[in-house]
Amino acid sequence: MVSTTRTRISKRLSPALIALVAVLIVGTVGFVALEQMDWLDALYMTVITISTVGFGEIKTLSHEGRLFTIGLIFAAALITFYAASVITNWIASGEWREQLERERERRMMKQLKNHTIVCGYGRVGRHVVHTLLEEKMPFVVIDPDANAIAHLRELGHMALHGNAADESILKQACIERARAIVVAVNSDAENVFIVLTARGICPDLQIIARANYETSESKLVRAGANHVISPYRIAGRRMVTTLIRPAVADFLDEVAHVGNEELLIEQVLIAPNSSLVGKTLAQAQLTERIGVTLLACKMPNAPTRTTPSADMVLQANMQMLALGSPEQLRTLLKMAGECA
């Protein structure tokens, strides 16, 4: 953190600043006592002595005054040497570069909106980040491993070092403006705490959580997760599908692969002002006009309708699952959001 770095530097330099003030006070009082100067002349004499600017003496000093002046010069030299060593070590250690990076990251995070927060940069978290990069979606990673955070920052990604169950860390990641949070820490217990904290901050946030054990799934849902994913269950089902239905598995791999330029499945939301609202599928002619295949439709709080019939009426806020090429799907997305 920038504030932590500044605090460390301030703590190192504070003894030198205190010593400098003490020398100014002792020097001023000393010149008043030894040379019978007035307070302003004594302060002036102290300043030009410890700053070594080379100005002449205000008045001829006594032997005691000269010995006192020599002591002031040595004290000022020691203070200067100590302060210089602190600053040199700060520069050599690269803390200044770290501070600049934190400032840059803080400014970038202030501009974040509709981003995804990824909690945990383990095996699952890495794949989440990789996919978000392929989809060109903004994200912030939170992880307690300092090495993982340093690696992400070296790659130019936004990352925060800390516990994602800490409310202050989530707020630093701008959770109030986030699109979703992916909770992918290795421990189910930690995932529950993170979900509870995130849901407490943002009641409407989409939360996707990882569950290592089936017994944890219901707990994560009760904690506030919208979706709970079990990597091991999905992997097991995928293996069985490959075993008994290899063609189906290959097809699903093809349409689910990010970066596929031939065939994709896209989720399309029909906006209230779309020209599609109020039309039947037969009237919309999505397959004939665009070339997409409509796989399913779903209204909020309603079951999914697979293989929708031609007389089904398209409604505002309806979610469509469509199969097509990237260009065809872009056209459908435009139609679903355009004005009538």
Image: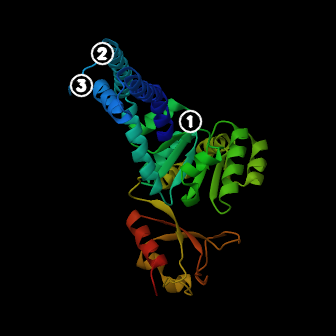
In this figure, which residue is indicated by the disc labeled 2? 62
> For the point 49% across and 50% down, which residue is it?
139
In this figure, which residue is indicated by the disc labeled 1? 122
Direction from residue 18 to residue 142 in the image, left or right: right
| N-terminal label among 1 and 3 | 3
> Element at badge 3?
loop
Q: Position of residue 287 (x, y in %)?
A: 46, 75
> Element at badge 1?
loop
In this figure, which residue is indicated by the disc labeled 3? 57
| N-terminal label among 2 and 3 | 3
Q: Amino acid at mark 2?
A: Ser
Using a 10 Å C-alpha cutoff, classify the residue at mark 1 as few (fewer than 14 neighbours), some (14 to 19) or many (20 or more).
some
Question: Dots 2 and 3: beta carbons under 8 Å?
Answer: no
Tag nearer the camera, 1 or 3: 3
Q: Residue furthest front?
A: 36
Direction from residue 81 to residue 315 in the image, left or right: right
